[in-house]
Image: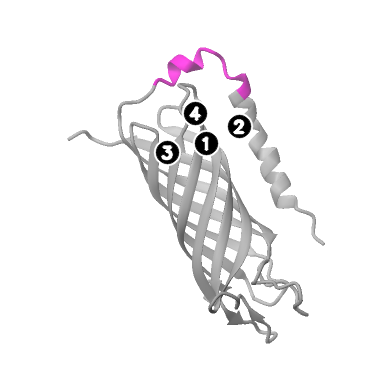
Amino acid sequence: MRSPTVPRCFVMLGMPILALSVTEPAAAESGRARSSLDYFQYGVALAAEVSAHGGDVCPSDSPTPCILGSGGGLALRAAFRSSGPWLAGGAYEFSRHDSSNLLRLAILQQLRGEVRYYLDRGTRTTPYGALGAGLTAYGPEWGMDTGGLVVAAGGGLEFQISQSTVVGCAAMYRALLLRGFTDSAGQNRSDRYLGFGLAHFVGLELVFEVREPLPRW
């Protein structure tokens, strides 16, 4: 069994962000005043999708190995951030996954709508809760052997480097409801709930985002 090197990497890279939140000086509070502006916020995230349970995609009684394991990739995100605690927008994520050699260059794609609720304390470091839902596709070399829905819930931390730049980290539970399909070894997968099945992942992200003020009407 492979060691979970991807999650360890995210823990190591995320520690500086947590350290900043603990050690930031009291003077930072005056530098992170609550904004009265709305923003267009966009950026990129280094993403890991860690398989929590293969579920119906990788049934325990299957003689073939799991076709949808852990993976990593990038997420691109754009959103509207209000002057209040809300952010709403969309994200496109692609990640390369371990398919036990059943697929060539297995790619999981997700197109999600997302919302965040910030617990603003008036400091540079702001925690938030997040929800998301959208569409997903999985197959070889950007193809589609199966597809369906994805829902997500979790939270993260955002650290403001400057007035226009933020970095952060997030952890999300994702449930994938995928259409049933038959793989190259002849194994039926994801065929439980009216031709669909579930798979469970934990999504980890290291985020870099830029925000630009929107003009007032």
Quadrant containing the C terminus is: top left
Residue sitting farthest toward the top? 27
- Front residue of this view, candidates 120 and 137: 120
Question: What is the crowding at mark 1: few (fewer than 14 residues within 10 Å), some, or many (at least 20)?
Answer: many
Q: 203 or 28: nearer the eye? A: 203
**Do callouts 1 and 4 mark residues in contact (Cβ within 8 Å)?**
yes
How packed mark 4 is, by other alpha carbons closer than 10 Å (few <14, some 14-19, many 20 or more), is few
Q: Are marks 1 and 2 in contact (CB under 8 Å)?
A: yes
Circle 4 sits on which residue?
161
- Mark earlier in primary sequence (4, 3): 4
Find the magenta span and give its range: 22-33
- Amino acid, disc 3: Val
**Dot 3, crowdedness within 10 Å: few (<14), some or many (≥20)?**
some
Residue beneath label 2, please? 17
Q: In this view, does 217 lie above or below 135?
A: above
Label 2 vs label 3: CA separation?
17 Å
Q: Name the residue under label 3.
A: 210
Sequence-wise, which precedes: disc 1 or disc 2? 2
- Whether the residues at callouts 4 and 3 have beta carbons within 8 Å, the answer is no
Name the side, left or right, on which 155 lies relative to 164: right
Q: Distance between the residues labelled 2 and 4?
A: 11 Å
Q: Residue at x 48, y 17 (%)?
A: 29
Counting residues from the N terminus, which is met first, the one under dot 2 or under dot 4?
Answer: 2
Q: Which mark's residue is nearer the viewer, 2 or 4?
A: 2
What secondary structure is marked by label 2?
helix
